[in-house]
Image (tube, coloured by chain):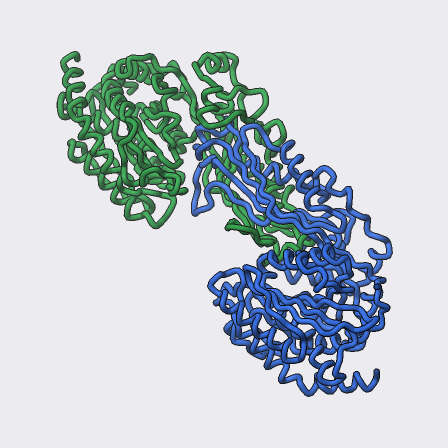
Chain colours: A green, B blue
Amino acid sequence: MGAEFEALEAYVAAQAAEFEERLCRWLRIPSISTDPAYRADLERAADWVLDQLKTMGLAAEKISTGGAPLVYGESPPVAEAPTVLVYGHYDVQPVEPLEAWHWPPFEPTRQNGAIYARGATDDKGQVLTHVFSTEAWLRTVGRLPVQLKFLIEGEEEVGSEHLERFLSSRPQQLACDCVVISDGTQFGPDQPAICYGLRGIAYYELRLRGPKRDLHSGSFGGTVTNPANALAQILASLVDQHGRIQIPGFYDQVEPLSLQERQRLAQLPFDETKFLADLGLSGTTGEEGYSLLERRWARPTFDIHGLWGGYQGQGTKTVLPAEAGAKFSFRLVPHQDPAKITQGLRQRLEELCPPGIQMELLETHGTPAVLVPVDSPYVQAAVRAIRQAFGREPVFIREGGSIPIVAAFQQAFGVPVLLLGWGQDDDNTHAPNERFRLIDFHRGIRASAYLWAELAKIQKSA
Amino acid sequence: MGAEFEALEAYVAAQAAEFEERLCRWLRIPSISTDPAYRADLERAADWVLDQLKTMGLAAEKISTGGAPLVYGESPPVAEAPTVLVYGHYDVQPVEPLEAWHWPPFEPTRQNGAIYARGATDDKGQVLTHVFSTEAWLRTVGRLPVQLKFLIEGEEEVGSEHLERFLSSRPQQLACDCVVISDGTQFGPDQPAICYGLRGIAYYELRLRGPKRDLHSGSFGGTVTNPANALAQILASLVDQHGRIQIPGFYDQVEPLSLQERQRLAQLPFDETKFLADLGLSGTTGEEGYSLLERRWARPTFDIHGLWGGYQGQGTKTVLPAEAGAKFSFRLVPHQDPAKITQGLRQRLEELCPPGIQMELLETHGTPAVLVPVDSPYVQAAVRAIRQAFGREPVFIREGGSIPIVAAFQQAFGVPVLLLGWGQDDDNTHAPNERFRLIDFHRGIRASAYLWAELAKIQKSA
């Protein structure tokens, strides 16, 4: 295998500039899945990656779903080696507030050793590490050591509704021994990591309606329930002063953190002071009794994502608004069931909703959390691949975010999911000035190339 | 005095159509003060009413202010009779949304016994009731029973900034024994009223900043204080579950409502069920222990006028926003000092502001409340005048809103202010299809004519 790796390393080194250029081409397509106006761009982004898979020789197809299309591509089976399903997504988050971007979000800009663009790290850049490592194998060795199945969707940022249906509709085609996903971050700039846990999410929109029209707050203030006041009261009542979420049954399924895990988390080289300073913060709040890392990865949360109501313009307006609303979510930990959370939330909101307010709760999406055993041979193969590409031992981490589809993969295939994030915490995911560092892009490609070889060493379970 | 009144009544009856026509002429001038594009129209509107005052024989002048001009006119002093300052305004609100108007806002249209136009009731039509009653006296009796001073401004809808300065600059010229303002409403279609109290206001904008950029709520949720969560908590903490405002010293200066006043308010023919049904409400909330009318007119309030933060667009975004903010105000009752309210609010906000949040409070404006004793001889004179013109006893009401200039008059002259609204609640003030009922216009003129005679009966205080 020595010669193979020399050739692989030489290829990815020679192609470095070309790989970056191809990433930029994909990033120029504004494939925002939350807004129907970008429907055609989703198709273009799907076509672009489909073409990449076909060009390197995979059997690939674009699959209509009713929503944004799926891109699927596979290499031939490899006897006695496992089948690896690589999942990623080509859709991206909205870009507002636009004025906060230093460069246009869809004109990828190389600065400070990174490419800045919406989707750079989430997830186009990370998807391409696996696409390009596969290309490297095929262009140098001429074959892959494992069978690869690429599944790249366009609805990750809006709940992966159609993908989940697709998974259950083609069990034969998608059958695999493990799933590989790169849609997250390392532990730090020089500290690669393997993520063995993800939080789930339950996302909602709450709309309150009061009087049937906006009223003058002088003539009517004090007489009617103000929907904006009610909104503040209701949202504030969902958490107590100790940071505990106030919904019936919310913590019933939450497993206490083991002493072993708390010790492992405590040993991670995490500098809380620097973490807060990087965010411009002199202090923080959160659930009492847990460390910052525990709160970040392994405890549920309540966050308001959007708030609106009444007059938001310049100057003053003495309006008593007819409506107010909010978007918010709970991050969930293993064993919490989004459907039960919704049930408890509805019960709590009904208790809280004051007279004179009509309430509407939209349940936008829900995903359970995920946990993978760190002693799995697949996890250990990833440890070796990362060690070779990064020259460092990865640490085991969890991730506070949710990849809804990971839960779906666990449910559909019952196989381990390897979460190998090549990004960094300060890559501005979902925020203005999203970026992907070039060094992470390139070592991601190399780690992926080693990973196919390391996974090939595992005795196929069948 | 019998013959005098016969002549006055005959004159206003004969001039009815002419008075309406002249009101329409004034209404055709789009004197919108909030938009600099209408500057020339403000001058035209000032010139038009200046001409009315001069033509009837008052010594009148147009006064430059740096903003829209003031119009001032006075009649000669009358020995041993009081001097009455009549205040009004010729500027009007913007007309948006234009598509909601049934007729063009600056082409006055007579329909359903009313004149429809922007400014019809607020305040051109009401100003002219006093101008025309004065003309009636001068054209029939040949003299006025009191000295009148007209002060008509063009910046009422934008804060009366220049008028307040003018009041303090000419104390001699403006000296008076009472102020008369008609810029409000009756209690109902057949129920004239004298308004003896106005609430004040203290208006603020609160801005919260958390992390220096928007964050992914998965990766960061639980680790940092979310400004939108903090905003909900802070705003919710400004009122308790009984509707009591939670600011140090907030109620210290609030005088308890007298039993007599509560009884008087309870006896007003106010249909709470109909009031709520008109607003599309099946229930309401407010400060416990007070009736709806008490809460509306005579108790302080806290109302959020605007709320913002994070993602307000279509679909979902799992952002932990860097900022959130709100506009809100407290309506104040007599003796509450806006400056002290601000002091208490700042103290409370500092207690409430959690670690990780930077807070900025902008104090937008503050105006104290106004109360005129109902047993004042000036109020009693107004009662008699209204009784004669309307054939009904006026009720005593308060108003939940604020007229900043009324507080300024009280402060500048220390004299009673008579708030004699001739309009109706459904005249669409500040809204599309503003109107002034012809019956209210004409009985306003007659009540004003009687008012000068009734005020003349008061022994001049000097």
Q: How many marks?
A: 0
Position in image of residue B387 (x %, y %): 80, 74
Of B96 and B366, which appears nearest the observer?
A: B366
Of A280 and B288, which appears nearest the observer?
A: A280
Q: Is residue B271 above or below residue A354?
A: below
Q: Is residue A429 above or below residue A78?
A: below
Q: Is residue A288 left or right of residue A333?
A: right
- Residue B448 in sight: yes
Q: Residue at x 63, y 84 (%)?
A: B17
Of A18 and B185, which appears nearest the observer?
A: B185
Q: Is residue A76 left or right of residue A230?
A: left
Position in image of residue A24 (x %, y %): 24, 35
Q: Residue at x 31, y 17 (%)?
A: A382
Q: Picture quarter containing residue A61?
A: top left
Q: Residue at x 76, y 43 (%)?
A: B251
Location of the N terminus of chain B by quadrant is: bottom right
Position in image of residue A314 (x %, y %): 51, 50
- Residue B383 in sight: no
Q: Is residue A365 left or right of residue A353?
A: left
Q: Picture quarter containing residue B77?
A: bottom right
Q: Picture quarter containing residue B182?
A: bottom right
Position in image of residue A78 (x %, y %): 20, 22
Location of the C terminus of chain B by quadrant is: bottom right
Q: Is residue B19 above or below residue A97?
A: below
